[in-house]
Image (tube, helix red, strand yellow):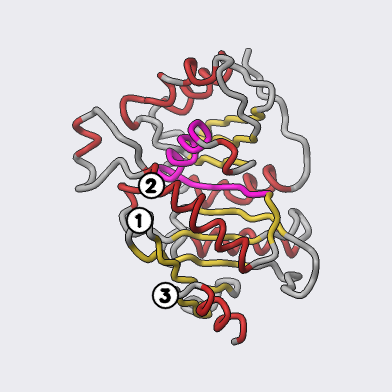
Amino acid sequence: MRLLLLISLLMGDGTASAAATDPSMPAHLTLRVPSKVLAETRVINVYVPPDYSGKADKRYPVLYMLDGGEQEDFPHLVGTLDALIKAGTIPPMLLVGIENTERRRDMTGPTTVESDRRIAPLVGGSSAFRQFIAEELRPQIHAFYKVNDDAAIIGESLAGLFVIETLFVQADLFGTYIAIDPSLWWNAEQWWREAGTRLNGSVDISARLFLAAAGDSAGASAHFADALCRNPLPNLHWTYARHAKLRHANIYRKLEKSLLTDAFSGQAMKPMNCE
């Protein structure tokens, strides 16, 4: 209870509560973080690993997840992460789930394609959402938890699009990027079309990217992977796989265990074969 009270007081208008809506979920804390950037309060679900102690000197890496509400993808991802940590497959880390308010606004950049703009009343807000994560959310997590600067992000579909966009426009925000069947068709495959210009010696992206596509998706992810092959960067380590038997509707749950293991078990990434 002291921890809950402390967080609530330090956050001013923010509040915190112990989350117990689903008894099958690992224990976690639900924070309500007021955002000046977004002009709204955001719900954040935070899981800490079993050995976490606020009194110890040890600091932990953080995995930030999009679609991180209790009615979204947080329950299944936190369960998988907790099981992998307890099995010793991956090291202990925090999981910070960001619940949606206006998902299609936050996950998309601007678009010139009329059919894109028809998917929601508001689109194109990814820059502000990224600013919220960088300038408001991450500092709060660093202030209240024993974490280090090792941060990763995971997202699927439009959230995967946000992951890829962030890799291009603010690559130093995270060290590891996991994009599951990202909606790279957005804005006429912008990130495929612009990859050559953005990557051709003009930037130095130091990060790891895990990219996966479902069998029923269009070829935008394959086009993007081809662009990465044609414009290699020495410090961008990446892998791409298309899973023909998986579908957009089930790829997240089917792959999350293997992707988390690949990303965090400490094994070296296999070089991408671009031949």
Q: Relative to 265, is 15 on the left or the right?
A: left
Task: Give the secondary structure at mark 2.
Answer: helix
Quarter of the picture containing the C terminus is top right
Task: Look at the image and give the residue range highlighted in magenta.
Answer: 150-169
Residue annotated with mark 3: 13
Measured as percent of width and height from the top left, residue 4 is found at 56, 81
How many marks the image carries: the answer is 3
Q: Nearer the viewer, residue 264 or 142?
A: 142
Q: Is residue 113 visible?
A: yes
- Give the secondary structure at mark 1: loop
State the separation of the CA atoms marked 2 and 1. Answer: 7 Å
Residue type at mark 1?
Answer: Leu
Of labels 3 and 1, earlier in sequence is 3
Name which residue type carries label 3: Asp
How many residues crowd around disc 3 within 10 Å: few (fewer than 14), some, or many (20 or more)?
few
Residue at the image point whose x is 66% and y is 29% from the top: 237
Tell me: residue 23, above or below residue 182. Answer: below
The part of the image, by quadrant, that contains residue 55 is bottom right
Residue neighbourhood size for the residue with mark 2, other residues' Cα within 10 Å, grouped as few (<14), some (14–19), many (≥20): some
Q: Position of residue 125 (x, y in %)?
A: 33, 44
Q: Which residue is mark 2?
A: 128
